[in-house]
Image: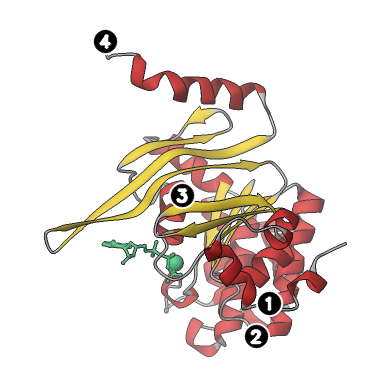
Amino acid sequence: MSEPSADAPQDDMITRSTTDAEILLSCQNVTKEFSVAGSKITAVDDVSLEFPESSVLAVVGESGSGKSTLARMLLRLMPVTSGTITYRGQDVTHLRGGDLREYWTDVQAVFQDPFSSFNQFFTVGSLLRRGLALAKVPKDEADALIEECLGYVDLRPKEVLHKFPHQMSGGQRQRVMVARALMMRPKVLLADEATSMLDATLRVNVLNVLHDLKNDLGLTVLFITHDIGQACYLADRVAVMERGKVVERGTTEEVIFSPQGDYTRRLLSDVPDLRGSLKP
Ligand SMILES: Nc1ncnc2c1ncn2[C@@H]1O[C@H](COP(=O)(O)OP(=O)(O)OP(=O)(O)O)[C@@H](O)[C@H]1O
Ligand SMILES: [Mg+2]
């Protein structure tokens, strides 16, 4: 039997998450250390965050602040050095096999560089159909679902299904990846700089799509960006990361109108007309 004392606070957190249905995903005291050339980097340092169901949480921070590392741990693509990840009240930190695959259906991700997510020998149509076949979606439903999800990102099937990755623009590739994630009908969508490569109009379009999906489907969105303007446009709550730590957190209004830290104020000063962009 292990010593119970160190686990006690986590057990308490898990119990609370079970009874408090609105927290879908959370992490408690998550840390990630890397060894690089003999020295230790703490990329994520004791981060605890909660993602309530049907809400958008933005994680904002400059390059290298640990956002993607945190995302990879939440997605269970990278092991934690320490800490706990909880989904629907269950400790998923060390989930394996079929349970982990089920988690990966519920928690979908779209990353910064869509080109690396594609197999260059597949057309978009075969990529999307394969994904649905693996998820055992019947063929007759698949085409309708593909059309529906491409519609969310403003692509017409005729426009992209026959194309190979290199025959599309970066923006189109990214929107295909968003559509692919949505096809799994996820509960959580983790978007890591997913809109960075889109031009301004398409970016607002995708942000609005994510906002609508939250409202219409109850999607929980973790929106990771270096751009506090986009974060505040979309998110209900914002967490600011600096050198691996969460240095500020609050509702979007709190972060915009009464930032606590200099780092947040500096990020905000880059976006002078932010207050006017707040959704009503
Ligand atoms: N696999 C790895 N091995 C070693 N160090 C890593 C690894 N992945 C990330 N790091 C380091 O961890 C820190 C955080 O990196 P991370 O990619 O999480 O930052 P980020 O906030 O996503 O940055 P960006 O906005 O540029 O995407 C950086 O110092 C980075 O160099
Ligand atoms: Mg990153």
Q: Quadrant of residue 260?
A: bottom right
Whether residue 126 can be seen here: yes
> Do labels 2 and 4 touch, CB within 8 Å?
no
Q: Is residue 120 above or below residue 50?
A: below
Give x and y (percent) for residue 212. 79, 59
> Do labels 2 and 1 touch, CB within 8 Å?
yes
Where is mark 3, residue-wise? Answer: 75
Where is mark 1, residue-wise? Answer: 203
The 10 Å Cα crowd at callout 3, few under 14, some 14 to 19, many 20 or more, is many
SS for dot 3: loop
Nearest to N terminus: mark 3 or mark 1 = 3
Query: At label 2, which amino acid type do we have?
Result: Asp
Q: CA distance from mark 3 to mark 1?
A: 24 Å
Residue at x 56% of width, y 20% of height? 15
Where is mark 2, residue-wise? Answer: 199
The residue most toward the left is 38
The 10 Å Cα crowd at callout 2, few under 14, some 14 to 19, many 20 or more, is few
SS for dot 4: loop
The CB of the residue at mark 2 lies under 8 Å from ligand 1: no
> Do labels 4 and 1 touch, CB within 8 Å?
no
Give left or right: position of 52 versus 266.
Answer: right
Of the residues tagged 4 and 3, which is closer to the observer? 4
Query: At label 3, which amino acid type do we have?
Result: Leu
Nearest to N terminus: mark 2 or mark 3 = 3
